[in-house]
């Protein structure tokens, strides 16, 4: 009788040990599969940001934005910067700064608010008419060539051909303006030599 009890006890313990071993093996296999899935997962975050007027489809992800997005957002930001009156210039400058990258916020703020003050002090208005657009998806920049017309009161005082560059920086799937300046029409994407707008 004791031999039967001992035999049943050993069989029970062996069965429990085998069950625990099988559960540990299954848990180990599951953890390995999960680690592999995490290691090979595509972590690209794509967020769709909508410009005020949509003319073309576009995309924005962690690595950059499509050429269409760069063109549409660049045009929107350029219009905020250059299509101004003495009354609207400061408001447009503050609106543009909402799209500024943290690293270039101070420089853009200084340039935009200085321009707004100049327009207000001289009672001038400016309008930029775009004639051509060149997009560089590789450098996340767009160059706009056109004519900047300046009015004082109701008289046109100047009409100058200019080219402006808008460059974007990307962070967490969002595109921020990092540079907005006048540029050389022959080499619009060259590095900035001096400051200016």
Image (cartoon, grey):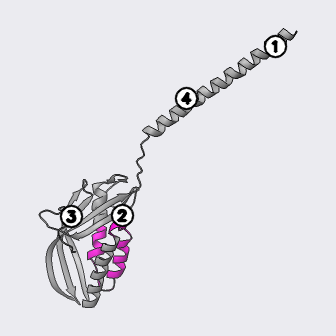
For residue 146: magenta?
Answer: no
Q: Secondary structure at mark 1?
A: helix
Q: Secondary structure at mark 4?
A: helix
Mark 3 and mark 2 residues within 8 Å of each other at the beta carbon: no
Mark 1 or mark 2, which is nearer the start of the sequence? 1
Q: Which residues are magenta?
A: 75-104
Q: Residue 181 location in percent, x, y?
A: 23, 70
Mark 3 or mark 4, which is nearer the start of the sequence? 4
Q: Kindly identify the residue that appears in the image at 18 percent across and 76 percent down.
A: 148
Q: Residue 176 location in percent, x, y?
A: 35, 63
Q: Kindly identify the residue that appears in the image at 79 percent across and 11 percent down.
A: 7
Identify the residue under disc 1: 6
Mark 4 and mark 2 residues within 8 Å of each other at the beta carbon: no
In three-dimensional space, the C-alpha distance between marks 3 and 1, rounded to whole angstroms, equals: 88 Å
> Magenta region's main secondary structure?
helix
Q: Kindly identify the residue that appears in the image at 24 percent across and 53 percent down.
A: 138
Identify the residue under disc 3: 143
Identify the residue under disc 4: 29
- Pick whichever, 184 or 78, lies toward us: 184
Q: Is residue 112 left or right of residue 98?
A: left
Which quarter of the figure has residue 81?
Answer: bottom left
Numbered mark located on residue 51 in the image: 2
Residue 55 visible? The answer is no
Q: Is residue 103 above or below residue 64?
A: below
In three-dimensional space, the C-alpha distance between marks 4 and 3, rounded to whole angstroms, equals: 54 Å
């Amino acid at each position: 009788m004791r031999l039967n009890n001992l035999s049943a006890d050993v069989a029970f313990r062996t069965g429990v040990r085998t069950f625990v071993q099988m559960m540990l093996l299954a848990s180990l296999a599951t953890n390995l599969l999960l680690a592999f899935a995490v290691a090979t997962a595509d972590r690209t975050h794509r967020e769709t940001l909508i410009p005020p007027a949509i003319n073309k489809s576009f995309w924005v992800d962690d690595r950059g934005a499509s050429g269409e997005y760069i063109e549409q957002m660049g045009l929107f930001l350029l219009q905020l910067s250059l299509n101004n009156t003495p009354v609207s210039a400061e408001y447009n400058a503050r609106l543009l700064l909402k799209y500024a990258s943290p690293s270039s916020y101070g420089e853009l703020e200084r340039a935009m608010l200085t321009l707004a003050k100049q327009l207000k002090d001289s009672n001038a208005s400016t309008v930029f008419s775009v004639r051509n657009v060149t997009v560089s998806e590789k450098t996340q920049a767009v160059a706009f060539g056109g004519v900047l017309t300046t009015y004082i009161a109701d008289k046109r005082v100047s009409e100058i051909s200019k080219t402006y560059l808008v460059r974007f920086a990307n962070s967490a799937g969002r595109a921020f303006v990092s540079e907005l300046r006048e540029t050389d029409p022959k080499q619009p994407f060259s590095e900035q030599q001096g400051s200016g707008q």
